């Protein structure tokens, strides 16, 4: 141990001390047994398996997108809780508290910026994660329900972003939510009622702000955390991340009530069903500690660095105080709903209700409709060219509509070319 | 492979050792600074309460020999000739507002009696009423600072006007 | 697992750890460095230099470096200007360079009660120069250039009463005489050809307003407003008056302060409160209380003030109710009564005026001059109108119309104005139906006034 880094030795001394042993039941792992125990004995880490397949560690496979989404969520919770100490969800005060955060709270601007950019990034990365899972066929059996939970998480992410968007109570917030809730109101039968309950009335006012605040800080985050827990649990129980040749693996079914004779790591590596098995394909599995955990730490540092960088150099927007009698022209929904707003501009019913409804339903039913088992664990597998093409088409359409809604729509939702300077607007409103 | 043999990770080169140490130090530093930053974030820089420092008025607003009760700030402004003092009107027993009596001050809640210097003459009050610092502001008003307690014999003396 | 891969780990770990650490330090540094701290340190240095006694030096050295703010809960404002403008109350800083200069004339409006932005506008909650002075994106109340500061007085005080705002009073006067009310509503009264002006001071900048008065169609496409011919001083005055229309109300404490005790205000109050119901002035009024024409000779101002505060305390058995006047209202009424003899009471008591005089008032009140010109002399352009492309003047209406025809025209208006050239767009200005707004008796007086406009003894040419 003499060559071990100084800090490592220091830490080991502490964890072997009396106080240290009362807190840390397993110190820094020295043996394979301890490496397994690092996972199974830890409160924070035990949702992870003791060993993972080497393929799951490939950065180029999963791109760490799910983890990035989780880290962004954690950053959002941390910064969000801090912001709660200053923000007041009242139409008279909310805007003022945003100004106070910017000017008189130490690191107020930084924390708010981190919160805003992490929010936008999270919507983006949850979407990217969804695309990755699709393109690698990782929604197929036995992971169908995990996909459904994932779609639910995607919708929750959109909901969290949308409810948070209103809170600054500036022109940007007020009108984006006005447009967004109007689109929601187009749904047949339930639309108007849902809008009424969401807004706590007919207008975007104090009641709407209170409800959106409650949804944003407790209801949706709690639901999201619970579902993330189930989501990660299912990843573990469904056999880890998907990989090629998974179907070909030999899975020894342990008869219930019996344990195999050659066990050496206790129960931690054995389970009925699809989990890495001891003694089968040993070269392809490595211990989570340190291989998985270290990569996770590195990725967390990277995500934190990116969010910090964005927050230091770009400020989150804050426009004028919300003015219900003075809509901006055009009034635009948040960027992730702009594709929807563009569709709605063609037809409220088909664009705002039918198409999005069909898309979400298709997403939810996908794993139950696509029962072919070929092509799991590889990007753009040839066998799945039809499914991949359909998905890519829909994705491209969504991107195109969103880009149109963002850049090519001006006052009165007229077509504009963003590279042309808009005519000088005479001052005043 | 003997599962209990130490794996290679603890036998690192000097380069790895330095890198790891710096990495950990930088990480710990970042965490510590972030935690300190989060705590500093929570410490308010401005208050939205009535200020502890306030202007009582112009010196001539207070007649000679007067004891004036300022209701909002809960203090007495005492003037004697050209000396100005400010006494807290909050009883040191349980916080009721004391009343000015013929001589001294009486608390209506539990009967504490204070003399003109604010010391306790009788009653349950544990110690004397506080005297606050009085200075002259830049625009010639009496400036009371309730953050600064002064001894009973410290007061603001203004030069006599010709 | 081999050393190589772990080394790679450690390498990345170090790099990212340093990166995150560095970014946190950068973020911390950016947050700690604030513009106002520099100004405060300069101020403390200045104070230490000026300290005459060790005691003063100690006080100066112990000045904390912190954000300072003035809380104005009734106005829903927080002004942090004094974070940089640290010497506003200290006369010895007169003439210093900003932000350490002294602010003169603040006695009537103490900073603790009024703050700064209620008069100077800008963004009170900001703590950087650019944001606080407000000429930034997404803040629509930039600081008012000092030459227009009188506009802020008009938010609370009657322009005509305020000796400190003569240009504002001039602006209000111009507004009434130029007939702007003919097309624009202000304070609920006026026409609706143009937009309401109640909050125009918050929506338009001084530069825009100037351009608009001189050439409305150039700044507002399709505007039918005729270009106004104002001299430079008059233009500034009326722009001031427009800037003062901010819709700012004076709540609670401020309402009790806003009356400047002038005789004009007293006359207004006298009329509002209905004193004429019990007292007689100039032969008009009730007989319950004494005649007031000479009260200034009989009673001292102190007596009158106390009488307004509490009538029974000076006149036991008096049936005059306690009106609950504020101090400034009582002083205004006292001023009025003291100078009753010298005042023109006609506008207070319409029955004292002749129909023609009343008609002149009505012509002014409803803004007829906006289209028909000051004193009905015309020359307001109305492009493509058959009447020489102008709104007709009314000096000679007595010749073309009977009283009944005039009355009918005023009440019913004339929506379709004959065009000179049918190929051009129709004339933008038309005669509204004033019957909905001007009362019947008032129309009679107006007609009397218009008929009186015929130049007497003029050779009509035939």
Image: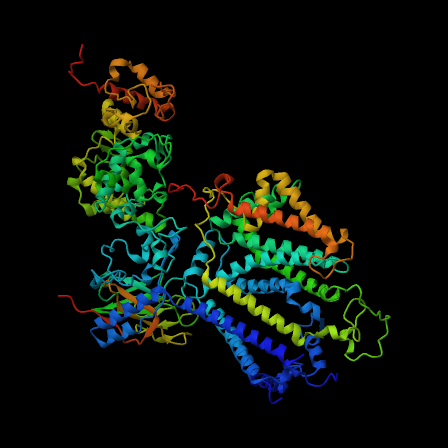
Name of the residue lying farthest toward the left: B162
Position of the N terminus of chain C, as image quadrant, is bottom right
The percent position of residue A171, horizontal first and vertical second, equals 47, 48
Q: Quadrant of residue C330?
A: top left
Name of the residue lying farthest toward the top: C462
Q: Is residue C189 above or below residue C84?
A: above
Name of the residue lying farthest toward the bottom: A2
Give the residue drawn at x 65%, y 43%: A355
Q: Is residue A217 above or below residue B124?
A: above
The percent position of residue C70, horizontal first and vertical second, equals 35, 59
Name of the residue lying farthest toward the front: A382
**Camera-side residue: C260 or A393?**
A393
Identify the colour scheme used. Answer: rainbow
Q: Is residue B140 above or below residue C161?
A: below
Q: Quadrant of residue C158?
A: top left
The percent position of residue A22, horizontal first and vertical second, equals 64, 83
Q: Is residue C143 above or below residue C412?
A: below
Give the residue drawn at x 30%, y 22%: C389
Q: Quadrant of residue C167?
A: top left
Q: Is residue A177 visible?
A: no
The percent position of residue A77, horizontal first and vertical second, equals 57, 63
**Camera-side residue: B122 or B70?**
B70
Q: How many marks?
A: 0
Q: Is residue C238 visible?
A: yes
Position of the C terminus of chain C, as image quadrant, is top left
């Amino acid at each position: 141990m003499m060559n071990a880094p100084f800090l490592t030795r220091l830490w080991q001394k502490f964890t072997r001390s009396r106080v240290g042993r009362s807190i840390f039941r397993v110190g820094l792992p020295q043996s394979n047994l301890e490496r397994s125990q690092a996972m199974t004995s830890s409160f924070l880490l035990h949702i992870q398996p003791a060993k993972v397949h080497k393929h799951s560690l490939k950065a180029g496979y999963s791109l760490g997108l799910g983890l990035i989404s989780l880290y962004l969520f954690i950053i959002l919770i941390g910064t969000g809780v801090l912001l709660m100490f200053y923000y007041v969800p009242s139409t008279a005060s909310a805007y003022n508290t945003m100004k106070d955060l910017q000017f008189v709270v130490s690191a107020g601007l930084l924390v708010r910026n981190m919160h805003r950019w992490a929010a936008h990034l999270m919507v983006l990365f949850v979407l990217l994660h969804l695309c990755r899972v699709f393109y690698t066929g990782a929604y197929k059996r036995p992971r169908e329900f995990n996909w459904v939970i994932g779609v639910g998480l995607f919708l929750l992410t959109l909901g969290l972003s949308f409810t948070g968007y209103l809170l600054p109570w500036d022109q940007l917030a007020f009108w984006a939510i006005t447009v967004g809730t109007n689109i929601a109101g187009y749904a047949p039968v339930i639309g108007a009622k849902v809008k009424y309950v969401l807004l706590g009335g007919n207008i975007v006012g104090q009641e709407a702000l209170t409800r959106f605040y409650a949804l944003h800080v407790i209801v949706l985050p709690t639901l999201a955390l619970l579902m993330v827990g189930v989501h990660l649990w299912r990843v573990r129980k469904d056999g880890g991340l998907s990989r090629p040749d998974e179907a070909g693996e030999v899975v020894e079914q342990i008869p219930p009530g019996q344990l195999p004779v050659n066990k050496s790591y206790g129960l931690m590596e054995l389970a009925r069903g699809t989990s890495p098995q001891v003694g089968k394909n040993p070269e392809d599995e490595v211990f989570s500690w340190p291989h998985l955990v270290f990569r996770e730490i590195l990725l967390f540092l990277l995500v934190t660095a990116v969010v910090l960088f964005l927050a230091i150099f770009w400020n989150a927007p804050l426009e004028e105080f919300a003015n219900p009698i003075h809509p901006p022209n055009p009034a635009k929904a948040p960027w992730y709903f702009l594709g929807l707003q563009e569709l709605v501009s063609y037809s409220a019913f088909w664009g705002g209700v039918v198409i999005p409804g069909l898309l979400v339903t298709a997403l939810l039913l996908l794993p139950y409709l696509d029962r072919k088992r070929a092509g799991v664990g590889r990007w753009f597998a040839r066998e799945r060219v039809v499914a991949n093409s359909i998905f890519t088409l829909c994705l491209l359409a969504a991107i195109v509509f969103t880009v149109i809604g963002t850049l090519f729509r001006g006052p009165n939702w007229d077509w504009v070319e963003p590279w042309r300077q808009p005519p000088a607007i005479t001052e005043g409103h | 492979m003997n599962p209990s043999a130490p794996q290679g990770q603890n036998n690192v080169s000097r380069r790895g050792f330095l890198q790891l140490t710096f990495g950990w130090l930088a990480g710990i530093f970042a965490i510590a600074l972030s935690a300190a930053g989060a705590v500093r974030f929570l410490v308010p820089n401005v208050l939205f309460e009535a200020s502890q420092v306030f202007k009582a008025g112009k010196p001539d607003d207070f007649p000679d020999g007067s004891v004036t009760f300022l209701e909002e700030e809960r203090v007495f402004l005492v003037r004697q000739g050209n000396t100005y003092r400010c006494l807290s009107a909050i009883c040191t027993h349980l916080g009721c507002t004391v009343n000015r009596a013929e001589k001294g001050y009486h608390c209506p809640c539990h009967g504490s009696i204070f003399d003109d210097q604010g010391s306790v003459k009788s009653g349950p009050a544990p110690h004397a009423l506080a005297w606050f610092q009085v200075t002259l502001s830049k625009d010639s008003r009496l400036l009371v600072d309730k953050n600064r307690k002064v001894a009973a014999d410290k007061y603001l003396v203004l030069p006599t006007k010709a | 697992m081999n050393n190589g891969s772990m080394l790679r780990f450690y390498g990345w770990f170090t790099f990212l750890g340093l990166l995150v650490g560095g970014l946190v330090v950068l973020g911390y540094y950016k947050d700690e460095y604030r513009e106002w701290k520099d100004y405060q340190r300069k101020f403390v240095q200045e104070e230490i230099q000026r300290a005459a006694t060790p005691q003063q030096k100690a006080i100066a050295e112990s000045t904390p470096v912190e954000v300072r703010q003035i809380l104005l809960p009734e106005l829903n404002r927080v002004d942090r200007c004094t974070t940089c403008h640290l010497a506003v109350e200290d006369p010895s800083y007169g003439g210093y360079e900003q932000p350490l200069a002294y602010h003169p004339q603040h006695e009537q409006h103490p900073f603790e009660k009024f703050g700064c932005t209620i008069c100077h506008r800008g963004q009170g909650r900001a703590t950087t120069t650019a944001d606080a002075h407000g000429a930034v994106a997404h803040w629509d109340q930039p600081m008012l250039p000092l030459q227009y500061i009188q506009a802020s007085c008009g938010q609370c005080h009657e322009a005509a009463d305020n000796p400190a705002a003569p240009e504002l009073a001039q602006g209000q006067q111009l507004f009434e005489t130029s007939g702007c009310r003919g097309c624009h509503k202000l304070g609920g009264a006026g026409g609706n050809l143009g937009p309401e002006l109640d909050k125009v001071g918050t929506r338009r900048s001084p530069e825009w307003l100037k351009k608009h008065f001189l050439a409305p169609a150039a700044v507002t496409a399709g505007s039918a407003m005729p270009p106004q011919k104002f001299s430079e001083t008059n233009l500034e005055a009326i722009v001031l008056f427009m800037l003062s229309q901010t819709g700012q109300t004076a709540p609670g404490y401020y309402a009790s302060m806003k009356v400047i005790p002038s005789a004009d205000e007293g006359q207004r109050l006298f009329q509002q409160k209905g004193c004429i119901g019990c007292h007689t002035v100039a032969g008009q009024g009730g007989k319950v209380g004494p005649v007031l024409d000479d009260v200034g000779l009989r009673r001292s101002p102190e007596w009158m003030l106390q009488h307004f505060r509490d009538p029974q305390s000076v006149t036991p058995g008096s049936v005059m109710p306690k009106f609950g006047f504020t101090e400034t209202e009582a002083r205004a009424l006292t001023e009025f009564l003291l100078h009753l003899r010298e005042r023109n009471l006609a506008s207070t008591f319409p029955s004292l005026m002749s129909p023609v005089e009343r008609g002149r008032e009505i012509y002014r009140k409803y803004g007829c001059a906006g289209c028909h010109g000051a004193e009905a002399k015309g020359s307001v352009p109305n492009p493509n109108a058959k009447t020489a492309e102008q709104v007709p003047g009314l000096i000679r209406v007595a010749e073309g119309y009977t009283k009944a025809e005039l009355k009918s025209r005023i009440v019913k208006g004339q929506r379709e104005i004959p065009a000179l050239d049918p190929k051009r767009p129709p004339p933008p200005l038309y005669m509204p139906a004033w019957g909905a707004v001007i009362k019947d008796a008032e129309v009679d007086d107006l007609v009397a006034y218009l008929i009186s406009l015929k130049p007497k003894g003029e050779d009509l040419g035939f």
